[in-house]
């Protein structure tokens, strides 16, 4: 039956999405902190529900992603899932995956990094992997996390792209929550996502070198081509979302999504599960006459510079929310990127940055409302806040 | 070396990438002392020593890094490391 709702855990939604995408090799290391994604996939494997697939048990995240380098180079559709410390342990290999242009898909259930020890949600883990050459998509809810998984395969495997992609979903808040969702239907997914048939793969009959040695005379060009692939991905991400809408009838935006931005003076920008709360607060503020809207960032890499410029061109003030910090700059990554997107343009409006929700700190509506008040102050009397924690406990420091 | 698509290239890139360029010392072969034991050619980490039919050896300076392992392992001091002059 089409559009049948089930109440399942976010991890299950994603595991199911992976299953219907028909992966050939899954490798992951379910150390804590982990999610149930790999557990659920293991169950599917044990029940014979994923044909033509190998699941590789490894002894660390480093090995998990390394196993997929080989598998993907050999032409397999591959999958892994990780979070926080596990992702950081993969760091070195992430560059190899993107440098070899292997379309590995990995779910990152975003969590804080140690020390201090904390297993709750923020986005420091994936943001810290920003420059590894992976596409990074951020989901708002569990339905989107599942649907985004199929979209990620679609984008990553495009001939003009051929890059790995992380589907980021807020740890616990999305990975462990039970919500009613429509699980991806196998027949529709087959229609959406064709079989992976790479042009080049490791084949003894037609030998090919992946990850070649590149001295100073060629290295620059490899890196240049990676950036070009990122540029190509911009359009493909939009297209993957549109094509998905045509087949499944669901759409969450392409590179970005906008909410009530048409006449907005204040525009909030954020990514991940916080989007729902912001929409609620915006509805309330709108009812009180505040002209406010939201830009949801779906694609953080490639960063949608043009789409953002267009979205905020008519606004008076932009506010970014970050569940991460670049220590030493006192800014979250989104603030930095948005400011750099608007520089050297005609758009000369203040951009205020707020960091919040780190290490799983709850983000109640009143935090967002307080931020909106500060944006209103800025509209009246010029920029009041460049970048600060919105929810710092002054009593502890 | 033509980059085909992203990371993949035609095989055989090491024929183009001559990595001997960063050598600081080069092995100097004294054939008169060589006892044809074959150790140097076995132990060279860069496969840069070829054993000829008569069991004497030749060095491939396109790839020799000048690590000195051959000189160190040679049992009859037939290989001497000398400063590379470029
Ligand atoms: S110096 Fe090192 S690299 Fe060069 S021939 Fe001897 S063992 Fe091989
Ligand atoms: S190790 Fe020394 S003696 Fe043996 S083959 Fe090489 S050069 Fe000759």
Image (spheres, coloured by chain):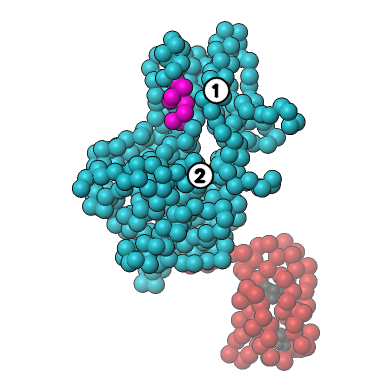
Chain colours: A cyan, B red
Give the x, y percent position of residue A151.
35, 45
Give the x, y percent position of residue A290.
46, 12
Tell me: B72 left or right of A317: right
Around disc 1, counting alpha carbons within 10 Å, would you say few (fewer than 14), some (14 to 19), or many (20 or more)? few
Q: Is residue A326 magenta?
A: no
Q: Is any atom of residue A105 visible in this view? A: yes
B51 or A244, which is in the foreground? A244
Determine whether B69 is above or below A272 in the image: below
Q: Is residue A281 magenta?
A: yes
Identify the residue shown where x is 66% and y is 71%: B64
Which region of the structure is painted magenta?
A275-282
Give me the chain letter of mark 2.
A
Residue at disc 2, CB closer than 8 Å to ligand 1: no
Around disc 2, counting alpha carbons within 10 Å, would you say few (fewer than 14), some (14 to 19), or many (20 or more)? many
| Quadrant occupied by the C terminus of chain B | bottom right
- What residue is shown with label 2? A172
Q: Is any atom of residue A165 visible in this view? A: no
Residue A366 disc label: 1
A28 or B43, which is in the foreground? A28
């Amino acid at each position: 039956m089409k559009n049948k709702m089930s109440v399942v855990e976010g991890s299950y939604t994603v595991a199911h999405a992976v299953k219907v995408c028909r992966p050939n090799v899954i490798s992951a290391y379910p150390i804590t902190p982990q999610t149930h994604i790999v557990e659920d996939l293991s169950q599917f494997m044990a029940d014979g529900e994923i044909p033509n697939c190998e699941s590789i048990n490894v002894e660390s995240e480093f090995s998990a992603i390394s196993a997929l380098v080989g598998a993907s180079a050999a032409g397999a559709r591959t999958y892994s899932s990780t979070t926080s410390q596990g992702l950081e342990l993969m760091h070195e290999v992430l560059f190899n995956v993107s440098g070899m242009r292997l379309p590995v898909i990995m779910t990152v259930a975003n969590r804080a990094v140690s020390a201090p020890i904390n297993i709750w949600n923020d986005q420091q883990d994936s943001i810290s992997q920003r420059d590894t050459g992976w596409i990074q998509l951020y989901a708002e809810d569990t339905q989107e996390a599942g649907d985004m998984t199929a979209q990620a395969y679609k984008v990553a495997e495009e001939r003009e792209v051929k890059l790995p992609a992380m589907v980021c979903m807020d740890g616990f808040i999305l990975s462990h929550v039970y919500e009613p969702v429509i699980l991806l239907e196998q027949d529709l997914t087959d229609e959406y996502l064709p079989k992976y048939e790479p042009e080049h793969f490791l084949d003894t009959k037609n030998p090919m070198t992946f990850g070649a040695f590149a001295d100073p005379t060629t290295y620059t060009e490899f890196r240049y081509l990676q950036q070009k692939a990122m540029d190509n991905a911009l359009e493909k991400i939009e297209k993957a979302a549109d094509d998905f809408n045509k087949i499944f009838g669901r759409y969450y935006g392409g590179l970005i999504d906008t909410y009530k931005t048409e006449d907005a003076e204040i525009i909030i920008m954020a990514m991940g599960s916080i989007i729902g709360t912001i929409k609620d607060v915006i509805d309330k503020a709108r009812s009180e006459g505040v002209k406010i809207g939201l830009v949801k960032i779906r694609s953080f890499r490639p960063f949608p510079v043009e789409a953002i410029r267009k979205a905020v061109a008519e606004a008076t003030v932009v506010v970014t929310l970050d569940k991460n910090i670049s220590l030493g700059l006192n800014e979250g990554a989104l603030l930095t990127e948005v400011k750099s997107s608007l520089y050297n343009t005609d758009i000369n409006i203040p951009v205020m940055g707020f960091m919040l929700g780190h290490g799983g700190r709850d983000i109640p509506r009143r935090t967002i409302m307080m931020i909106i008040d500060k944006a209103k102050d800025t509209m009246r009397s010029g920029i009041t806040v460049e970048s600060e924690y919105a929810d710092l406990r002054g009593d502890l420091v | 070396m033509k980059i085909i698509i992203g990371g993949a290239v035609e095989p055989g890139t090491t024929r183009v990438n001559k990595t001997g360029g960063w050598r600081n010392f080069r092995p100097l072969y004294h054939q008169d002392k060589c006892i044809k034991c074959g150790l140097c050619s076995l132990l060279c980490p860069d496969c840069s020593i070829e054993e000829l039919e008569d069991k004497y050896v030749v060095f491939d300076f396109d790839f020799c890094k000048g690590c000195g392992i051959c000189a160190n392992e040679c049992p009859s001091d037939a290989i001497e490391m000398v400063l590379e002059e470029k």
